[in-house]
Amino acid sequence: MKKEGQIRVDSENLFPIIKKWLYSDKDIFLREIIANGCDAIKKYQSLCTIGEAEDDGNSPRIDVILDKDAKTLTISDNGLGMTADEVEKYITQVAFSGAKEFIEKYSDKTDAEGGIIGHFGLGFYSSYMVSDTVEIDTLSYQSGSEAVHWSSDGSSTYEITDSERTERGTSVIMHLSEDGMEFCDSIKLRSVLKKYCHFMPYEIFYSCVQEKKDDEEEKCVNITEPLWLKAPKDCTTEEYEDFYREVFPDINLPLFWIHLNVDYPFNLKGILYFPKQTDKLQVMPGEIKLFSNQVYIADNIKEVVPEFLMLLKGVIDCPDLPLNVSRSFLQNDGEVAKISKHITKKVADKLVSVFKNERKEYESYWDDISPFIKFGCIKDDKFYERMKDIILYKTTDGEFKTFSEIPKYDNKVYYVSDMNAQAQYVKIFKDNGIDAIILEHNIDTHFVTYLEYKEAGTRFIRIDSDVDEALKSDAQEEDKEENEKLIQLFKDALGMDKLEIKAQALKSEGTPAVITINEYQRRINDMNRLYGDMFGANNDKAKETLIINTANPVIQKLADYEDEKRDLLCRHIYDLAAISQRKLTAAELEGFIARSVEVMDMV
């Protein structure tokens, strides 16, 4: 038998479109061809189940064979195969859908439609992204069928002849083009197989003709029953951790995980892991892999997985999604929006459960999971409503408290962003019985602003931003005239026109002076440092205010010193206040060291 013909399509020549526009990632051709093989196997098994085909007892498998000398890549399956008429229909008449016909024929007999990717169709033609010529060698499961060979060089013509194939199934032989020569590399092929086919439902075996040894044992390159398919009650901690190591290159084990297993109102399975954050200042990006019937689709599709959940690591398998899913499809599909909301709810439910039943364990996770939770609250008000009662705040004493439990002073909440840099302020506050919470992550700059919006009437103030009334001494009345003289003395000694100087008695007599920074201006500057000058303010250093403590003995004796020594002490007092507030510049540190030597000479 020999037959030549022209491939029938409903538009102009299909191949240039496929090669250049259909797939943005050339590697996807391997997924498409192997997925078609899985589909053919699944259909054959379904037909055997309903008695339409006879099971020959052969284990289902797909072989990926590279021949570097011949420059061919062959994908073989032992699925249901095709007759000459089916090759004619499904390969040369692209507009027809084999999967649709299959479902319509057998939907009343079996649940065969679950897992239908498509009976060849456009997925097969992705092979031309890397090939000059493609051949198909196939033999149908149907009794009395003859093997068929099909080939086309990428033009709109094809040739069908008899084949010598004796085993049921289909082989796709791709003669690699110059553009596809990268797939003559075993390392490249194994990498693509791991990315796209690692969890496909049937065993995949890879071999290279030039590398294969006669006594070498065949090894399956994929996992056919990934952990997410098991019922959560049947999974052990060791299995969850091993699966995490298998999928993600992370030397740290996850803190805990959520196993998703939903059958209604949509089909969804997966595992989301809460990774350990290795950087305490930056939010480390996660990775959520999206699958459809164990076939990899993409990473981090925000239409399916809310943006803030992408800080997690995990896998989600949603059979209702098409393989070649587009952003526009996801954005306009109502079911996708429901899936996204359900995932968010399940995550919130898990966190609430851990908080209520294992609070100590929850507290031990908090430093790692807090950036994810805070980011989620900022991005999703509904998530905040679910989480607001279990958001924890660590006090400077190391205790974890909820928002209702944290100390508030006239609806003010004091916080620390750097326990070392702000140690002096922490001591002043503690000496006066005022507690503060620790908010040291970069995201906290945004989070406190969000909380002030959500918790109307509450203000968050960093402890170095202002000297509150609670810290001012009430033991003596202020002498305004003397204070003005003191302020002028410091102004003359420091010579800093932009520095605001105030004088007032503090309860903590041991501190000669402190520097404060306006809370609002500092927040704007912090955001500008993170994102550039996008908040309408310049990047100048936030305005400092020097508070001279008139209750301090050193300050009270300043007038007794000669002008030169008094100026030196004023400078030194400012240096000490600056060190307690921030890191000195190189020039400031050099001056501080020199002045320290001079002060010691005064002793």
Image (cartoon, rainbow, N blue to C red):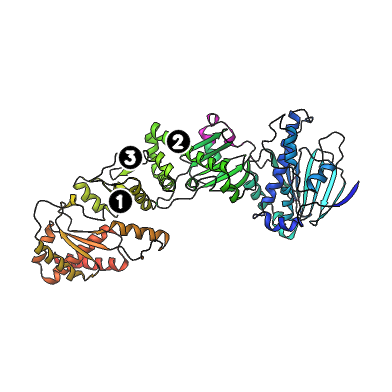
Image x and y of residue 9, in percent:
78, 52
Up the image or down, 492 lies above or below 451; here it is: below
Residue 164 location, quadrant: top right
Image x and y of residue 35, in percent:
69, 43
- Please indicate whether residue 403 sits to the left or right of residue 143 in the image: left
Q: CA distance from mark 3 to mark 2?
A: 17 Å
Report the amino acid beneath label 3: Thr
Cβ–Cβ under 8 Å for marks 3 and 2: no
- Please indicate whether residue 28 sits to the left or right of residue 489 in the image: right
**What label sits on residue 419 in the rendered view?**
1
Residue topped by disc 2: 349
Local SS, label 2? helix
Between 414 and 590, the one lying in front of the other is: 414
- Please indicate whether residue 391 sits to the left or right of residue 425 in the image: right
Residue 198 location, quadrant: top right
Residue topped by disc 3: 402
Up the image or down, 328 lies above or below 398; here it is: below
Q: CA distance from mark 3 to mark 1?
A: 20 Å
Mark 3 / mark 2, whichever is N-terminal = 2
Residue 431 is inside the magenta segment: no
Residue range in magenta is 210-239
Between 258 and 592, the one lying in front of the other is: 258
Local SS, label 3? loop
